[in-house]
Amino acid sequence: MGSTTASTSRNAKRNAKRARAGASVLAVLTVAAATAGCKAQAAGSAPEAPSAPPRATATDDNKPTAPPSSPTASPSPTPPTATASPTPKPDPQGTTLMASGSQGEQVRELQARLRQIGHFDRSPTGYYGTVTVAAVQSFQGKRGLTRTGKADTLTWQKLLGMTHEPTAAELNPPTTRPVTKPDKRCMTGRVLCISKNSRTLSWMIDGRVVSSMDVRFGSQYTPTREGTFSVYWKSRHHVSSIYHTAMPYAMFFSGGQAVHYSSDFAARGYNGASHGCVNVRDEGKIASLFAQVKNGDKVVVYG
């Protein structure tokens, strides 16, 4: 009986110990589950939204602050509206075909046609200078067109309708001025025979006139020297070292004086003067002359 009582007592103690151990394990598991924050979620259900962060209180080290607000997207700037530039109005008289500074065969034809109806009072030069501008303005004014001085398509068409196609003699007349009887020194050999009175140059070979052209001379302060000379130097693209002006087709005969093409003479005619040279205003003619004249050919300049 005594041993049975002792055994029962030992069993009761073991059971009580086991019960206490089980309670401890349960308590630990409960605490672990609470601190892990995990929560079972049914399959297919949406996850819960996270809880808002705790707000700071007055007892925290930092001052209480409101939870940060979500940034607001700034509106995208409106692109500037493109302003269409006004379309330029077309010239009512059409496209400009020739204007001041133009040169060539079409300019020569323009001048010849203007001369046929009394708007151009000299031989065609092929250079569109101030005289041609004035002639075109005169024609435009008579026909009720804007006096631009430019040969535009409308001006050109009206001119074509009022004139005939220029002949070779109208396009390239010998000279605008009558050629006087040559000086006797010009009657033998190859000679540039230049008359100040008629303001002409005649290229002569053995007394025969091969070609003639208008020329212009120096002013009273820079006169062209008279006498008998010879060509000593030819310079196709010459530029004056004193006046820095172009002297194409230059044929020097007395110091710095030469026979050469002058665009100023072509443009202004006898309203100007040279610095002593013999100016030619027809580029085509002097180009041909330049090709024929040789160094050593005679030059006669007379009054």
Image: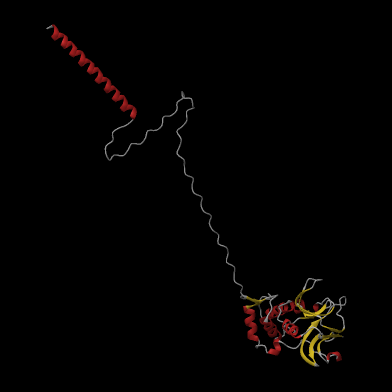
**Does the rendering let one see residue 181?**
no
The quadrant of the picture occupied by the C terminus is bottom right
**Occupied quadrant, residue 172:** bottom right
User: Is 53 displayed left or right of 38 in the figure?
Assistant: right
The vertical placement of 128 against 31, above or below, is below
Between 98 and 184, the one lying in front of the other is 184
Question: How many numbered circles are shown?
Answer: 0
The vertical placement of 268 against 54, above or below, is below
The vertical placement of 51 against 126, above or below, is above
**Does the rendering let one see residue 16?**
yes
**Coloration mode:** secondary structure
What percent of the width, then of the height, locates residue 42? 27, 37
The quadrant of the picture occupied by the N terminus is top left
Between 190 and 198, the one lying in front of the other is 190
**Occupied quadrant, residue 70:** top left
What percent of the width, then of the height, locates residue 198? 83, 87
Q: Residue at x 25, y 19 (%)?
A: 21
Q: Residue at x 31, y 24 (%)?
A: 31
Q: Which residue is drawn at 16% across and 9% down?
A: 6
**Occupied quadrant, residue 155:** bottom right
Furthest residue toward left:
1
What percent of the width, then of the height, locates residue 123? 74, 85
Between 233 and 278, the one lying in front of the other is 233
The vertical placement of 246 against 212, above or below, is above
What percent of the width, then of the height, locates residue 278? 81, 80
User: Is 117 displayed left or right of 182 in the figure?
Assistant: left
